[in-house]
Image (spheres, grey):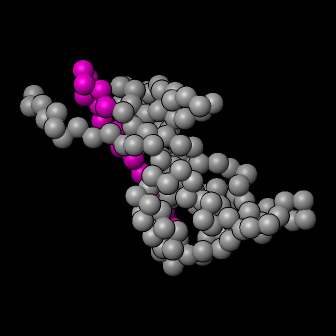
């Protein structure tokens, strides 16, 4: 089998800008999540998917559901393959908190924006902004 170490890819820390990500991992750990100020490996479970909530679902849930900061690390000893499916709104879709989740006790957290506006902002920050959502939060 041919090896191409220079083509090995990892992903720096980020939250997904989309609605939902479904990830199929093989049997080699590479996905890590940031929880309680430390990186924790997500052990692969055979025949199971990892489902990540993206920023769009966090906006639509009025901050009730949170996108998790994560990264993918490489492994110099063992090859690893993952397949990701990204569920993303159309560019022209208006993203905003669901009306049923906004009331006097739970004020609207994020302003409405088109998905393309959000994605442009996220990409301008190279997807590494510590909290891209801050730009879209309503100010008290």
Q: Give the range drawn in magenta.
A: 74-89
Residue at 30% across, 36% down? 81
In percent of width and height, residue 82 lies at 34, 39
Magenta-span inclusion, residue 77: yes
Instruction: Identify which residue, 9 or 18, lies in the foreground.
Output: 9
Residue 79, quarter of picture: top left
In percent of width and height, residue 133 lies at 60, 59
Predominant secondary structure in magenta?
Answer: loop
Q: Which residue lies furthest to the left in this view?
A: 2
Image quarter hosting the N terminus: top left
Residue at 68% across, 50% down? 65
Apparent side of residue 64 relative to residue 80 in the rendered image (left or right): right
Residue at 42% across, 63% down? 123
Residue at 53% across, 43% down? 69
Magenta-span inclusion, residue 64: no
Q: Which residue lies furthest to the bottom in this view?
A: 92
Residue 101 visible within the image: yes
> In the picture shown, does residue 64 fall above or below 56?
above
């Amino acid at each position: 089998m041919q090896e191409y170490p220079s083509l090995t890819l990892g992903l720096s820390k980020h939250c997904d800008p989309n609605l939902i990500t479904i990830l199929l991992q093989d049997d080699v750990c590479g996905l890590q999540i940031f929880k309680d100020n430390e990186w924790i490996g997500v052990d692969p479970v055979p025949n199971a998917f990892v489902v990540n909530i993206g920023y769009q679902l966090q906006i639509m849930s009025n901050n009730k559901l949170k996108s998790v900061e994560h990264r993918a690390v490489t492994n110099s000893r063992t090859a690893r393959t993952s397949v990701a499916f990204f569920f993303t709104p159309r560019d022209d879709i208006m993203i905003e908190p669901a009306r049923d989740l906004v009331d006097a006790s739970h004020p609207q957290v994020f302003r409405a924006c088109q998905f393309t506006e959000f994605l442009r902002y996220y990409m301008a920050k190279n997807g590494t902004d510590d909290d891209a959502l801050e730009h879209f939060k309503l100010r008290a």
